[in-house]
């Protein structure tokens, strides 16, 4: 064998070994990425932390959540008591059943319109209620050009539902430390129209509870591309702190701002009135609120994913829900 051939074979052998090592390292790193989020840097301590959401659970996908939002927007405007509104409820039920959640429906009439709340249940232990409204406003009364047209509700309606439906996919019953109620409220967004108040569906549910949730977390209008979620002033302060702490650990302090900005009447208020700690996760700095421009192209997968990851991470910590503040069941 010539010296040149021997040298060539030797170099080739070394290159093969190096390539093998590089591929092995890349595969291992890819496995970390696929099995959960990468290691993150804590905004507070500077210490590298691994989010609790990656401990054996399925990762929350903003793209999947956005798909659920698009499915709702494709139906069109979805006001309470309409065929499209009922179709949306059926869609939610089908997704929940696909992911093996136990589904219950709470139906009642209000002002001769049929109203339907939907609850998907899974897990055992203290009850944690995660809620969103799925109805949309029948008129765009904040729209200067077309105030009498119905809205699509890409953000105000579809975004919160989308996050809950993706949680239905990723939450594993064996990992849950609580009984989770994924709750979809009807008749939230008809307030100040024909004498209706806001939050009719949630008020009815809170007044007719057979079991008492340990706490309630509402997600509403959280998909805005320019996401800034401030503390809502009527929300339980300890529960706010719990959830925003998780957001900070995940590196989302820029989007979950621990400062008060708004005090809102929303679906969390009826539960607060029952003595149940509740928070409203809402980005109310949204220029398209109650206009025909509130469509699915105003929301992004990244915004949905941040909210979903925070909720998934918070649940994985046990979701304490300020338990000491919960009063005894009447």
Image: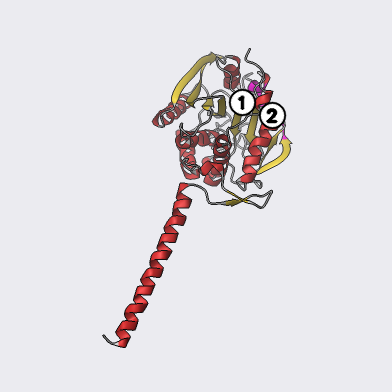
* SS label for mark 2: loop
Residue under label 1:
215
Residue 120 shows up from this direction: yes
* SS label for mark 1: strand
Which quadrant, please, contains the C terminus? top right
Q: Identify the mark at residue 236; answer none if there is no mark.
A: 2
Q: CA distance from mark 1 to mark 2?
A: 10 Å
Residue 322 at x, y = what percent? Answer: 66, 28
Drawn side of residue 180 relative to residue 230, left or right = left
Tell me if label 1 and label 2 are in contact, CB under 8 Å: yes
Q: Upstream in the sequence, badge 1 or badge 2? A: 1
- Residues drawn in magenta: 262-272
Q: 46 or 200, which lies in front? A: 46
Residue 194 falls in image quadrant:
top right
Number of other residues with Cα within 10 Å of mark 1, as a class: few under 14, some 14 to 19, many 20 or more: many
Is 286 magenta? The answer is no
Residue 327 at x, y = what percent? Answer: 67, 18
Residue 329 at x, y = what percent? Answer: 62, 15
Which quadrant, please, contains the N terminus? bottom left
Residue 181 at x, y = what percent? Answer: 52, 26
Q: 32 or 201, which lies in front? A: 32
Is 268 magenta? The answer is yes
Query: Is residue 63 shown above or below 153?
Result: below
Seen at 71% across and 28% down, the residue is 234
């Amino acid at each position: 064998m010539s010296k040149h051939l021997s040298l060539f074979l030797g170099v080739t052998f070394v290159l093969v070994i190096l390539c093998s090592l590089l591929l092995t390292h890349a595969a291992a790193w890819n496995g970390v990425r696929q099995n959960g989020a990468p290691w993150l840097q804590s905004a507070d301590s500077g210490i590298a932390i691994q989010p609790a959401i990656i401990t054996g659970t399925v990762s929350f996908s903003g793209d999947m959540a956005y798909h659920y939002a698009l499915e709702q927007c494709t139906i069109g405007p979805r006001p309470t008591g309409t065929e499209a509104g009922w179709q949306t409820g059926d869609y939610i039920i089908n997704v929940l059943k696909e992911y093996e959640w136990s589904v219950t429906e709470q139906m009642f009439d209000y002002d001769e319109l049929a109203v339907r709340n939907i609850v998907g249940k899974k897990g055992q232990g203290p009850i944690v209620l995660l809620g969103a409204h799925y109805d949309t406003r029948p008129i765009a009364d904040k729209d200067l050009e077309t105030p009498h047209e119905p809205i699509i509700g890409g953000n105000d309606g579809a975004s919160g539902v989308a996050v809950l439906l993706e949680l239905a996919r990723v939450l594993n019953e064996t990992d849950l430390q609580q009984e989770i109620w994924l709750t979809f409220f009807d008749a939230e967004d008809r307030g100040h129209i024909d004498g209706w108040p806001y939050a009719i569906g949630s008020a009815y549910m809170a007044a007719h509870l057979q079991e008492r949730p340990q706490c309630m977390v509402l997600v509403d209008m959280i998909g805005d591309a320019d996401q800034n979620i401030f503390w809502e002033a009527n929300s339980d302060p300890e529960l706010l702190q719990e959830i925003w702490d998780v957001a900070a650990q995940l590196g989302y302090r820029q989007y979950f701002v621990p400062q008060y900005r708004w005090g809102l009447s929303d679906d969390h208020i009826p539960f607060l009135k029952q003595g149940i700690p509740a928070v409203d996760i809402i980005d109310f700095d949204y220029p398209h609120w109650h206009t025909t421009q509130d469509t699915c192209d105003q929301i992004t997968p990244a915004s949905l994913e941040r909210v979903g990851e925070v909720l998934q991470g918070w649940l994985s910590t046990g979701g304490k829900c300020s338990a000491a503040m919960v009063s005894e069941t009447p």
